[in-house]
Image (cartoon, rainbow, N blue to C red):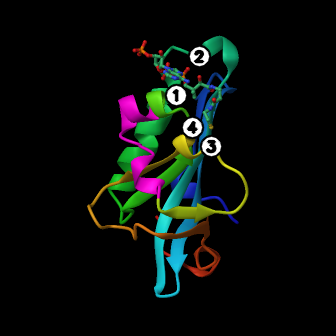
Amino acid sequence: MPVIDALSFAAVEDGKLLGSIQAWPARVHDVNGSDSIILVGPVAVTPELQGRGIGKMLMTRLLETADAGAADAMVMIGDPDYYGRFFGFHADATSGWDVAGPVERHRLLARIRRPGGIRAFGQLGPDPSFATGGVAA
Ligand SMILES: CC(C)(COP(=O)(O)OP(=O)(O)OC[C@H]1O[C@@H](n2cnc3c(N)ncnc32)[C@H](O)[C@@H]1OP(=O)(O)O)[C@@H](O)C(=O)NCCC(=O)NCCS
């Protein structure tokens, strides 16, 4: 899948990469149709610079940009403490979704902006319509 350029950022200082975050077009679908969802990650900060707010800055920039657009939902795999405490992601919202391959369910986190904005049950996977003008962002 192509990355969502508008929601992918790099933290750079003096030409040096400090950290980055990426977003990808995904969907939750069932026999009746599908809902777009943004897959967030990886987010990473260079080890010696962790704990200085760069990760928060990258995620905040992504969330603010996404919230200004049409995106209703985001999903990621990550530490529920970090992403729940600071950014409103939680595993409850993903409990009805099937995923391909093994995943630690308590680390499969979603942030749903509008209640009912995405179906509660279905298969999570890539959104093939994005490459041809889909609406993930
Ligand atoms: C997770 C990561 C992106 C956070 O970025 P960061 O720049 O270090 O974090 P920030 O400085 O913005 O935030 C620091 C705060 O988050 C907390 N925090 C950081 N990582 C945490 C974790 N895994 N679990 C819980 N809290 C965490 C810190 O305790 C700190 O809290 P405080 O502000 O109350 O002191 C970074 O540590 C990292 O690159 N880790 C390795 C890659 C990774 O695990 N990525 C996530 C999955 S894709």
User: Which SS does the magenta portion mostly show?
Assistant: helix
Q: Which residue position holds label 3?
A: 104
44 part of magenta stretch:
no
Q: Earlier in the sequence, mark 3 or mark 4?
A: 4
Residue flagged by tag 2: what amino acid is it? Gln
Q: Is 71 placed left or right of 109 in the picture?
A: left
Element assignment for label 3: loop
Assess mark 1: CB under 8 A from ligand 1? yes
Q: Which residues are magenta?
A: 83-95
Tag in front: 3 or 1: 3
Say whether marks 2 and 1 touch (CB < 8 Å).
yes
Tag in front: 4 or 2: 4
Q: Earlier in the sequence, mark 4 or mark 2?
A: 2
Assess mark 2: CB under 8 A from ligand 1? yes
Q: Which residue position holds label 4?
A: 78
Residue at mark 2 to residue at mark 3: CA–CA distance: 24 Å
Q: Which residue is pictured at 64% across the width and 77% down the height?
A: 128
Residue flagged by tag 1: what amino acid is it? Gly
Residue at mark 3 to residue at mark 1: CA–CA distance: 22 Å
Q: Earlier in the sequence, mark 2 or mark 1?
A: 2
Residue at mark 3 to residue at mark 4: CA–CA distance: 9 Å
Q: Which residue position holds label 1?
A: 55
Element assignment for label 2: loop
Q: Earlier in the sequence, mark 3 or mark 1?
A: 1
Task: Residue at the far left: name it.
Answer: 115
Q: Is residue 136 visible?
A: no
Residue flagged by tag 4: what amino acid is it? Gly
Say whether marks 3 and 1 touch (CB < 8 Å).
no
Assess mark 4: CB under 8 A from ligand 1? yes
Residue flagged by tag 3: what amino acid is it? Glu
